[in-house]
Amino acid sequence: MRGVLGAIAVPFCVVVLGVGIQAAAFERPPRDALVASDALRELFRFRVMRATEVVGRHPVRSTCVQGWFRPLHSRRPAPGELVLLSSGVKLYDFGNGIRRIGRRGAVSRFDLARFLLAGCPRFMAERVGSQLVRSRWVDTDASRADGVATLELSFGDRTKPIGLYVDRRTYRPVALRLAGAPKQGWSDLIAGGGRAAVLRVRQAFHLLAKSRNNA
Amino acid sequence: MLEPAVAGRIERRRDAIAWTLERGDIFAWWAASRTIVLSGGLALHWLHRPRGYFGRHIFSHALGPLESWDGIWYRHVAEHGYLLVPGHQSDPAFFPFYPLLLKFVKAVGISTGAGGVLLSNLLFLGALLAFDAFGRAVVTPTLARRGTLLLAVFPTSYVCSMVYPESLVLLAFAFAGVFAVRERWLLCAAAATAAALARPEGILLVFPIAAYVVPRLRRLETNERGRAVAAILAAPAAAISFPLYLGWALHDPLAWSKAQHAWGRSFRLDGIFLAVRRIGDEVAREGWAVRDIAFCVVTLMLLAAALRIGAPRGWIVLGALIVLLPLGSGSFTSDARFGLLALPAYWGLASLCHGRLRFALAAGSSAVLLAAATVSLPLVFP
């Protein structure tokens, strides 16, 4: 019996001491970081985001579809985001910066704001995640948006942060706010979208190849 | 009254000097091999090339190259603790014991970077001495010493001078072996605990320790038997404490495997077959994969040589699993580094180096490869 007790007691002590020492030695991540991490997990679930954006005076509807696409003049599919605005403007990013169809070079601050406010889930998640990994700084504040109890996740430039509002219970994205960089703006978000929305965007971009993993 | 105490002290000092002199070659080889690695690191710092994946910030200080790759993550854990970031490579993939030691180093006032390099080098010296003691207990003294010296200059041992936990795990493995042979079960359990908290491979100590305990179980007294079984279970118990801690701190006990997934290490049953089938693709995509594949094969061959000279089978199993299990992720990536922990391989290598000339050739070529591996650090992940 004593032998069995010893055989059990030592590993049990190892487990308890192991957990205890780790708990004493390492900082527990701040609550904000944990919440941001949960919100990130939720963001990664979606491939499509629909939004009503306001930059300046006129509201514009947008649909962001992300996945693997084969850009024109390219043989290999690349991961990226396509944003179609109700004004007909088409913005995209295949990892080489945000571009606008029909215009050469980098986009204007106005178009950049439009692209950000479209709330492409993976694009947002990449930025929040990188910031979490690097500095652990992502503020979360209780707030309300569109009558829903939300949490505001602030990230990006500390003086002019981007605020992502997520449902306090489900962490589903609800709204996005740009505090000034690149422009001031706001968008109401609806995560997810039907097959029709995806098709419409792909047709608008003249993408013949099928995208992978689209929601 | 004073005389016996003074005499005892003098005798102890004499013993210590004799002990050190007897292991003089180990100290010398450790110093020489670490000089090679540190010189390689300094050469990278001065020349700023090859550039490879390193940014300027890594070349900008003397020990930068030795603090790079996973070293950055271990330091990050020591300074900030753990956080799982979905969809990103994050730190719960790294076991806690080494960053814990880095924290102590920082508490003394040394930076985690320079302190980590110093710590790893000292732990490696301890590992060599403990491995020599272990070898003397299980193979001939000549093989044990030669195996130890070959480990000192082994090409992948450059990681033992980096901010990596390999030297800590080597030390814990060797101590677990020494204490198991001496039937000091609680100390063996402590060494196994340290190994399993430092790297997931530590859990594999179950095999060699069980191989010592099981045949002796009947002749052990009840208390001893309990301690012996506890020594077997210590490593899995320690490994379990990590997900339990992550469950408490991050509210996610599976954070380790999720983080591993983000690092491209998701294990599947047919992973080994996949890894073998994909060899061609892997080499075509990244030529350095040849290094990992070659070291995996060499390690297995050296383990076979060790088996032939009668090295303990439990340790052979551990060595084989150390290089084969990571293939479960479908890739050979880093298998060369993992193989460094297969202790019997060095006895196997020593057994193949009869005579001074062969030994000198093996040691010389190992030292050259060690230097080459160090200066190629910017080009390939260890």
Image: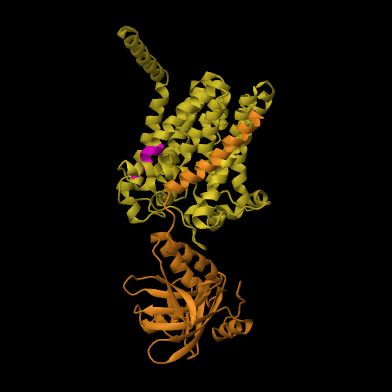
Chain colours: A orange, B yellow
The correct choice, above or below, for A77 with respect to B345 in the image is below
Q: Which is nearer the eye, B194 or B226?
A: B226
Q: Is B116 a magenta residue?
A: yes
- Residue located 50% across and 41% down the image: A17
The correct choice, above or below, for B38 with respect to A195 in the image is above
Image mark count: 0
> Which quadrant, please, contains the N terminus of chain B?
top left
Relative side of B60 to A58, left or right:
left
Q: Which is nearer the eye, B5 or B154?
A: B5
Residue B202 seen in render: no
- Residue located 55% across and 47% down the image: B290
- From which residue to which does the magenta span run? B113-120
Q: Which is nearer the eye, B75 or B283?
A: B75
Chief SS of the magenta region: helix
Q: Position of residue B182 (x, y in %)?
A: 56, 22
- In the figure, residue B33 lies in which quadrant? top left
Q: Position of residue B284 (x, y in %)?
A: 56, 55
The correct choice, above or below, for A35 with respect to A22 in the image is below
Q: Position of residue A30 (x, y in %)?
A: 42, 60
Relative side of B76 to A206, left or right:
left
- Residue located 40% across and 48% down the image: B78
The correct choice, above or below, for B113 with respect to A117 in the image is above
Furthest residue toward front: A1
Q: Is B174 a magenta residue?
A: no
Q: Which is nearer the eye, A17 or A85?
A: A17
Q: Position of residue A88 (x, y in %)?
A: 49, 90
- Residue located 44% across and 54% down the image: A28
Residue A27 seen in render: yes
